[in-house]
Amino acid sequence: MNIKKGTEIEILIQHLNINGKGIGKYEDYNVAVNRCFPGDKVICVIKKIKRNYIEAELVKVVEESGLRVPARSKHAQYSGSPWEVLSYDYQLEVKQKEVERIIGNTGNDNTQILDIIGMDDPWYYRNKMQFSFGYDENMSPVLGFHVSGRRYDIYDLEEDFLCEEWIPEFVNYFRQRTLKAGFTPYRFKNGEGQLRELTVRVGKRTNQVMVILSVSEQMPTEEANKILEQAMHDLPYINSVWLEVVTVQAGRRTEKILTHIAGDKDIQEKLITNNQEMTYQIGPNTFFQPNTHQAEVIYQKVADLAHLDGTQTVYDLFCGTGTIGLSLASNSKHVYGIDLVEESIEKAHHNQEINKIQNATYIAGDIFKTKLDWPNPDLVVFDPPRAGLNPKLIEYITSLAPKQIIYVSCNLKSFAHDLEAFKEHGWSLKSIQPVDQFPHTRHLEVVGELTYADNTC
């Protein structure tokens, strides 16, 4: 058969790949299709043809898999929680097998791969949500999430089971106050329109709420301020409101200006690790693990692997606001943290102060350009961005000759890639703990313990 783009084919989905796409066979080709699952018989249309590999778009499901369960949300087919049509036990099974497959391919044959830690209740777990203003397929203005696989199409959010029960009411309130009041979504194609994004951050243990409204420079500032001030009055659960004005000009860097409008400047969240409750400040741009409950699981696993007894020096790289390092401080001799983002370090200093931690030092800077007058570490721990580490940084970390390295990652692919570089420097993966931080999606978190060949610990 002459295979070409635009051809419709029928296949049986056999498994899911690392990107969450269903994989089936057609002649000698592996075919990847969005929004389908093992056991589905589907008709799809070919979009790209590569060597032994086809990317296709789902046309319809001819016969549904027996693994499917009724979706809780009417939006599950679009985005946000695409895997909720699978039983939660099966979601965990898929993620566990993917970890085993990818780590098995790295050559770390002696690695202990622990069972994934899921959630007892995998709903209403997110502490941050970001909604987009835009247009649906009928070009009606809406407020919700991007449709999976489409760059510009937004669907109007009516239900949500990932963050808080009041989210639909909250979104509808801002929909009425903005879109129904005549303001228009920003259009990237022509740079016209006022409304860009609406972000909500929630302290799951403190019940504090922050709202950030992002608009273009075409939005009248007084009108935006009125909307946020009125929201503080009408929605009593909101503690903090901010306005972000984004200015886009051809040939110039996009400018973003944040202004505190009303309420508190920050909200707080609490995490319990090592039988101690820690309080953390969260600002509009602060990085914080999006699942509070599973963040505690991750940090507890780091502490368990570290076996600290009060005599060890700890380096916390990509330290952010200090969440990992501060959780280890009570059992460490001293914790040293560094991050490029000055705002994060300011929050780290504040978190250190409110938790009354004396044995921690945090600085803002580039690790390659900043002179670090620190003692050599016993433990190096880091939770880098999704892209992982570059070879230069891996070389630097290994040159410190710590007794132990703990690598926290939200991207299994980049984690496995970095393992190869660590292996070249004599380090191997002793154990890996998968944690399901993102139920009903393909994503997960891992905590890896690396040891040097000459270490006897």
Image (cartoon, rainbow, N blue to C red):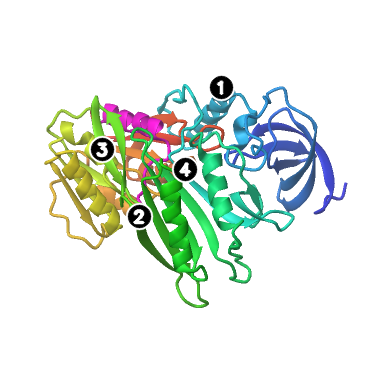
Q: Amino acid at mark 3?
A: Thr
Whether tag 1 and tag 3 are in contact, CB under 8 A, the answer is no
Marked residue nearer the N-terminal end (1 or 3): 1
- Mark 4 to mark 1 CA distance (whole Å): 21 Å
Label drawn at residue 436: none
Foreground tag (4 vs 3) = 3
Whether tag 4 and tag 3 are in contact, CB under 8 A, the answer is no
Q: Amino acid at mark 2?
A: Ala
Q: Which residue is mark 1?
A: 89
Label drawn at residue 279: 3
The percent position of residue 235, horizontal first and vertical second, equals: 45, 44
Marked residue nearer the N-terminal end (4 or 1): 1
Q: Which residues are magenta?
A: 285-306
Foreground tag (1 vs 3) = 3
Q: Nearer the viewer, residue 167 or 232?
A: 232
Q: Nearer the viewer, residue 12 or 423?
A: 12
Q: Which residue is mark 2?
A: 262
Q: Amino acid at mark 4?
A: Asn
- Mark 4 to mark 2 CA distance (whole Å): 36 Å
Marked residue nearer the N-terminal end (2 or 3): 2
Label drawn at residue 411: 4
